[in-house]
Amino acid sequence: MNTNTPIRVAQVLAGAAVGGAENFFVRLVAGLNERPELDTHAFIRGHAHRLEALRSSGVTTQGFRFGGKLDILGRRSFRQALNAFEPEVVMTWMNRASISTPKSSRYRLVARLGHYYNLKYYRHADYWVGNSKGICKHLIDGGMPADRVVHIPNFADETRVEPLPRDSFDTPSDRPLILAAGRLHVNKAFDVLLHALVDLPGVTLWLAGSGPEEANLRALCSKLGLDERVRFLGWRNDVTALMRTADLFVCPSRHEGLGSIVMESWVHGCPIVATNSQGPGEVITDGLSGLITPVDDARALTAAIRSVLESDDLRRSLIEGASQVYAQGYSREYIVNEYAEFYRRVTGR
């Protein structure tokens, strides 16, 4: 093997049109593509906006259907393209990409997990990357060899953005403003946040996201008398700009993987209050890089939000502490280097 040639790495994603994992995929693959020791190609579901985002970053990218079990032609097309690239490492993201990608003696197969997925889809891999220590434990407890499970966190979108006007979305500009974002799903516990908001008179909430719980959340909002103080923003591609605008970011989840949104709040100077769900509870040091409250405890969430909104000193302290934590273990430069070192290690290059 010529050790002077770049390591050929295939990144495989069959994800949804929008989503946090999909956004991080684009950021990471673009960062890896800048490394001269790597030859990075992306094999993704053919969403036009994601193809364009990757190609505009210089990443050689191909789109495929990634259909179900009956999509024999689509699966064959993907596998032929993958084999033609002759990868040394193939990293799959989430269930469908992992199911579609066979084990092979020609490459090291790496399954990258960002949540507590059913492990039956990942057992054929050679190595596993978990973006939180909790997910790594989930893998090891599930029977994966501990010496082949690697912890590499996510990094945030570090692009500098300008805040939105404070009165966007018909928001009173003279009131405290908090932000929450994510899929409107029961796991995200936005219902708990609405209950917490009841005892925070005058505070406006921007809720960015879409999902199956939207109708229930809107109904609860009306029931609690919060319609005048809550703005449902739908799915947004400018969450970091929203963070630059708001006084506080709140992550009330019942269940959360790493929670990349935590890192985004750190980078963009928006202090965070989060519940002690899996990912945020692991990475946030209470009182240093954010405030942590118990899961499903609206009263504790209210108290934590109020403490930040009423204390400029606490707000500044949390912003400064989060910035230091991010730079030392979660930055783009740090994480891209961790992946590059991992690929060198598994290929012996």
Image (tube, helix red, strand yellow):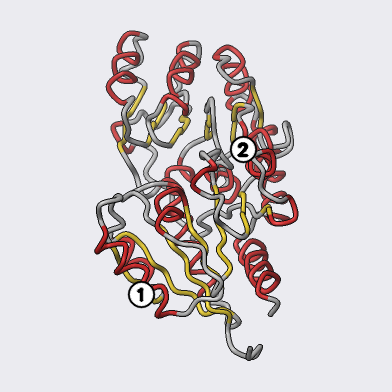
Point out residue 31 in the picture as x, y percentages from the top left corner.
Answer: 53, 69
- Mark 2: amino acid: Gly
* Residue behind mark 2: 279
Q: Who is closer to the viewer here, 317 or 290?
A: 290
- Residue 264 numbered mark, or none: none
Q: Quadrant of residue 228?
A: top left
> Which residue: 57% across, 57% down?
125
Q: In this view, does 149 lie above or below 132?
A: below
Nearer to me, 243 or 2: 2
| Image quadrant occupied by the N terminus | bottom right
Q: Name the residue under label 1.
A: 81
State which quarter of the image contains the C terminus. bottom right
- Image x and y of residue 317, in percent: 71, 39
Label 1, secondary structure: give it. Answer: helix
Of marks 1 and 2, the one in the foreground: 1
Mark 1 burial class by Cα count in 10 Å: few <14, some 14-19, many 20+: few
Binning the other alpha carbons within 10 Å of mark 2 as few (below 14), some (14 to 19) or many (20 upward) gives many
Residue 15 in the figure: left or right of residue 64: right
Q: Earlier in the sequence, mark 1 or mark 2?
A: 1
What is the x, y in percent for residue 128?
61, 54
Distance from disc 1 to disc 2, alpha carbons, whole Å, reads 35 Å
Whether 27 is drawn above or below 239: the answer is below
**Where residue 85 sits: x, y (%)?**
43, 79
Q: Which residue occupies the foreground of this view, 42 or 239? A: 42
With 25 as the anchor, is 263 left or right in this view?
right
Amino acid type indicated by mark 1:
Ala
